[in-house]
Image (cartoon, grey):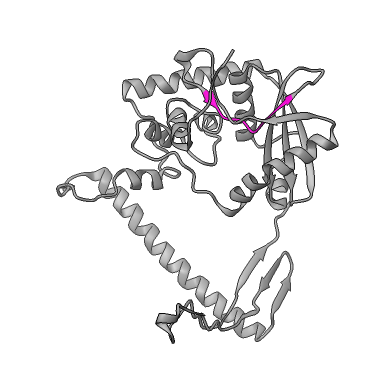
Amino acid sequence: MPKIINPENRDHWLALRMEDVTSTQSAALFGLSPYATEFELYQQKVGALSDEIEPNERMTWGIRLQDAIALGVAQDNNLRIRRIKTYWRHDDATLRMGSSFDFEIIDHPDGPGIMEVKNVDYLVYQREWLDDEAPPHIEVQVQHQLEVANREWALIVVLVAGNTPKVIRVPRDREMGAKIRDAIRAFWARVDAKQPPKPDYAKDGEAIRSLYRDGKGAPFMAHGNNYLQALVQTYAAAQREEKDAAARKEAARAEIVTMIGNASKVLGDGWSISCSETKDSPGTLVTPDMVGQTIGARKGYRQFRLTMKEVA
C-alpha cells in the first residue's frame, strides 16, 4: 500500500515533491516531457533550479474548471468520485517515487480507479491527441500514478474547447510501470553520485542560463581553445542569419502591405493575413491625487498576422 501524507500547506506539499520524482516529472526521464528535460529535472532535485512551472492562462483555467469537468463526466457516466487532497508515495520508500492526483473513482465494479482531468484547446487536441490515446507524457504520467497508487485502471478525462468531453480508459501497464521504476532508480543514482546527465543544448539553453546567471566570475581565457572558437563562430553566423532574416521579413511585409493597401484581411492558397486596425487607447486616469496623469496610453497600429494552414 502507498504511504498517504496529508500536506499541512503548499510549502509542505512542495517539500514532499522535492524528495520524489512525481508523476508530472517522470516523462522527462524518457525525453517526453514538454516541461523539462532530464538535465533540468536533475538540477531541480539538487536545488539549483526551481521545479515550479509558471502557469499560463490555459493551465489556470484548467485548475479552476477541474471540479466541474470531473463532476460532469461522472454524472454522464454514472461514476462516483472524490477529490484526492493527499500526497501519495510508493510503498518502496527507497524508490523516492510519489504523486498527487485529481480524483479517485470509488464503488466501481472494476475496483477503485483514478481520474486525471485535462482542459485542452481544440487545436492542441487535434494536433497532439487521439480519440483513444493521450500524448505520451500524459500516458507516462498516468502509468506513474497507477504504479504509486497500486490501482489497475484510470480515466483520462479531457474537456476539449470548453464543451466537448472525451474519456480515455487506461489499464495499468505493468511493463511500463517497471520501466518507470527503473528509470527513477537510475535517476536518483545519478543524483546521489553527483553525476548530472549531459544537457541537450538545443532544449536546455534557458536552464543553463539560469544556472550561470550572475556573471561575476573571473575572466575566462579562451586563447587557443579551438572548440570554443568554433562555437563562437557558429553563434556569430547564426546571429548574422537572424539579422538578415529579420530584414527580409520586414521587407516582405512592407511589399505585401503596399500590394494589399488598406485591406483588413487577405486570403490566399493555404494562408491568410489579418491586418485590421487597432485603435488608439487613451490610457486610464490614475488616482485622484495624481489628476491629469494616465497610464497605459497607446497609439493605434495596424495588425499583421500571417497564418499558414497546416498540411495533413
Is residue 116 part of the magenta span, yes or no?
Answer: no
Q: Residue at x 36, y 58 (%)?
A: 237
Residue 245 spot, x, y in % from top left = 47, 66
Residue 102 in which image quadrant: top right
Residue 281 in which image quadrant: bottom right
Residue 49 spot, x, y in % from top left = 37, 39
Query: Where is 281 relative to 18, above or below?
Result: below
* Lateral position of residue 198 relative to residue 98, left or right: left
- Residue 93 in sight in this render: yes
Residue 166 in which image quadrant: top right
Q: Residue at x 70, y 69 (%)?
A: 272
Query: Where is 280 relative to 30, above or below?
Result: below
Majority secondary structure of the magenta segment?
A: strand
Q: Nearer the viewer, residue 132 or 120?
A: 120
Q: Nearer the viewer, residue 9 or 304?
A: 9
Number of numbered discs = 0
Image quadrant where one finds the N terminus:
top right
Identify the magenta region.
98-105
Q: Residue at x 29, y 52 (%)?
A: 232
* Lateral position of residue 135 relative to residue 250, left or right: right
Residue 92 spot, x, y in % from top left = 51, 12
